[in-house]
Amino acid sequence: MGIHILVLNLGSTSTKVAIFENKTCLFESTLRHPTEVTSLELIDQTEQRYDAIMAFFKDNNFDIQNIDIVSARGGLLKPVAGGTYEINDKMMEDLTSEKFGKHASNLSGIIAHRIKETIGVSAVITDPVVVDELLEEVRMTGIKGIERKSIFHALNQKAVARKFAETINKNYEDLNVIVAHMGGGITVGAHRKGKVIDVNDGLAGEGPLSPTRSGSIPNDLMIKHVLSNNLSYDDAYKLLTREGGFVSLANTQDALELENKALSGDKYAEQIYSVLAIQLAKEVASRAAVLKGEVDQIIFTGGLAYSKYLMELVKPYISFIADITVYPGEEEMQALAEGAYRVYMKEEEAKIYE
């Protein structure tokens, strides 16, 4: 009999919860929360979210006392190196105070810590979105005091890179790969020997356009747009992160809807997908430059990777760089389970958040 791992991944409107035995998922569910819960301040949602998770155990007739370790999606914390971290008092302080930002994923660690205290087991996070392994040369910008940040789909990017490495009997730390995670936002990372040395800030809209992000915008035109429309900081940030991309161009964030229009001959929809394809290709090519052309594989993942139409548009631009592998969807729950498993089995040592 193996170890039992509880995996928690909290989003803005739902909670993904799963129980793994070793690396195999036994039960998994996405718990949808009513608006009266999700409209509350994040911290005020804790009790209702916790109760929903407890109901999940009851529904699956599984005794929570049989859990050996809890693994949670990392929230907005200070920049850290990749790896698996113990949820300690310092991490709890930063999550509950929202010192580094407010996001539903903060609740993952908060509730994991509560369960840890209740049943007396360890609780960890793996590869949070704030993983920062950037080269100093890519961090610096042309304005003193403004630096690029590392905020990206670290968990899934590193998970699919490890998955590819296993298929060729190599270690992730032995390879150079470029990983593009394509969801509501798009991040493209240059992974050099296990470190993500360059990646765009997919949260603030840097990089390719996406279903909800604007992507990189000419500086002068963005300044003029903000001033001429009398936008506040919050208005401008919303435009870049939630009302850009497909939302701005086509009044939808539904990629499948837009793709179906393109496949039906809608010229404007075709144009948007062509623009996305070339922007993706340029982002991949720039990561190849940072890796000095030494690229073992290019990997596409995330929800948009299900689109064969998009993949066929992108490939001609980048196939000269390296071979391409597509892992549609995301591996977050599996990756969280495997991070906890490696620590529990002492295959790696849990890092300390300080």
Image (tube, helix red, strand yellow):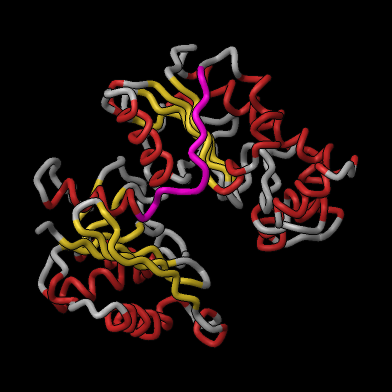
Res 318 quadrant in image: top right
Task: Please state, as top left, top right, bottom left or bottom right, where the N terminus lies in the image.
Answer: bottom left
Can residue 73 be seen? Answer: yes
Verify whether residue 130 appears in magenta.
no
Q: Which residue lies furthest to the bottom in this view?
A: 36
Rendered residue at 39%/65% (across/down): 106
Rendered residue at 48%/27% (across/down): 178
Rendered residue at 17%/46% (across/down): 342
Relative to residue 84, is residue 21 depicted above or below? below
Instruction: Give the magenta range.
Output: 323-333
Relative to residue 175, is residue 156 depicted above or below? below
Res 132 quadrant in image: top left
Residue 303's spot in the image, x, y percent?
57, 48
Relative to residue 343, is residue 294 depicted above or below? above
- For the residue pair 24 and 300, the one nearer the viewer reads as 24
Apparent side of residue 57 relative to residue 133 in the rendered image (left or right): left
Res 191 quadrant in image: top left
Rendered residue at 36%/68% (across/down): 17
Residue 325's spot in the image, x, y percent?
49, 29
Residue 246's spot in the image, x, y percent?
75, 50
Relative to residue 276, is residue 211 depicted above or below? below
Verify whether residue 328 appears in magenta.
yes
- For the residue pair 41 and 31, the one nearer the viewer reads as 31
Residue 306's spot in the image, x, y percent?
59, 44
